Image (tube, helix red, strand yellow):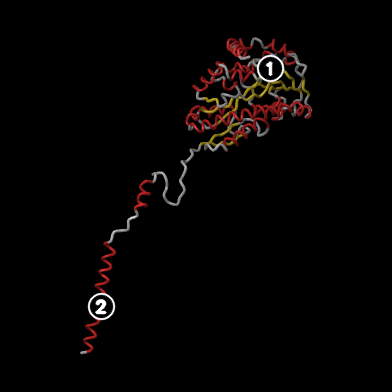
Amino acid sequence: MKKIFCILLSLMLIISLAACGGSSSSNTGSSPAPSNSSQSSSSSSAPSNVSTGNSEPTEPAVEENYLKFGEKGVDAGSTAELWHYWEEILDASGSGLTADCFFNAQLGTDTEMMEQILLDEPILLLTDCSLLSAYAPELDVLNGPYCVVDINDYYKIWASDWFKEQVEILRQNNIHLVNCYDPCLFGFRNFIANKPIRSPEDLKGMKIRTMTSQMCMSIVEAMGGVPTPLSFSEVYTALAQNVVDGAENPLTVIYENKHHEKTKFISMTNHQSTVFFIVMSENVWNSLPESQQAALENTGIEAAQKYNNTFIANAQASVEANLEADGCTIIKDVDVPAFKEATKDVYKVMGLQDVYDRVQSEIAAMN
């Protein structure tokens, strides 16, 4: 009997515990979650673009674009300094626009690079009006004999109505002039030859390397020489192997590209001035966001000014002494009036007399 009583007591205890457990479980499941009114309010009022977690707010991604600076010349001297400086300040601009330099015609000759630009390759090319006159013919006047006798007159030309018209014509041909505010001044062209050239008589019959430009060839021909057009990359070999009797270029080009190593007479005719244009595809320019256009234009102005005031200025200050130290004879007693007289009809021959007269008139109006 006692045994039965113990069993019944145990069963009652088990039933009681089970009932208590069930009641507790039911109460937890049915109770609503605690309300946090301040958290709810904060969450609902937070701006949608601000994270309320532990991560930091993110800035919008900067669009990235890439350019190639193409150069036919060597990776040395004032022009190389221009490109490297521009690459450095452009990369540091934070615009997302970056560039690399390609020297020694790695991207091709000037003509080949221009063809790529017209096909919208992201190339910037530093060239002169000989090449650009194929697209804006009146620019060829700047390559004419003694057109610009004061190199600083190019600032006046760049500000002239005539020049603005040429920039627009280039645009219509998918060519964007990046340095439309600051010309890159390169100096005057002079003869380097295997003998002194003091007058047109001295030039008669001499084979002179020229650019592949009708204006340049016409000038040499009017002076009595035999124009021999060759690409820039061929000049050193042509002079060293006597394929030509001479060439013509600014002194810094002659020195930096070692054209004087085998040809030792430099005659200071100053018959042409050289200014550089920096161009790219108009379509590529238009594809850049405004912030990158501004970065490219502003750094381009800074690079052009650095070039004019420092790089080329330093090179020109020492180039004559460097050439003479390398064994060159610099001929300064040149009959410049005779060369001017010999070339006075070149503008008429080239159909540019009216253009020449207008450019001279606009320069004079700014004096």
Q: x and y percent of residue 49 in the render?
A: 41, 44
For the residues labelled 2 and 1, say whether their Cβ atoms are less than 8 Å apart: no
C-alpha gap between disc 2 and disc 1: 119 Å
Q: Position of residue 325 (x, y in %)?
A: 79, 29
Viewer-closest of 199 and 336:
336
27 vs 255, left or right, is: left
Q: Which residue is mark 1?
A: 271
Reply above or below: 110 against 146: below
Q: Residues within 10 Å of mark 1 (few under 14, many from 20)?
A: many
- Percent from the top left, x then y, of residue 347? 62, 12
Dividing the picture into quarters, in which one does residue 88 lie? top right
Answer with mark 2 or mark 1, whichever residue precedes in sequence.
2
Question: Image point 23% across, 88% down: which residue?
Answer: 3
Quick one: SS at disc 1? strand
**Residue furthest front in the image:** 38
Q: Nearer the viewer, residue 66 or 97?
A: 97
Residue 41 location (% of width, % of height) = 35, 49
Q: Nearer the viewer, mark 2 or mark 1?
A: 2
Q: Nearer the viewer, residue 361 or 281?
A: 361
- Kindly identify the amino acid type of the residue bearing the numbered disc 1: His
Seen in the picture, residue 285 relative to 35 is either above or below; the reply is above
Residue found at the far bottom of this picture: 1
Residue, disc 2 = 14
- Tell me the quarter of the image containing the C terminus: top right
The residue type indicated by label 2 comes to Ile
Q: Position of 12 compared to 44: left or right?
A: left
Q: Is 136 placed left or right of 154 in the picture?
A: left
Q: Residue at x 26, y 72 (%)?
A: 20
Q: Which mark is residue 161?
A: none
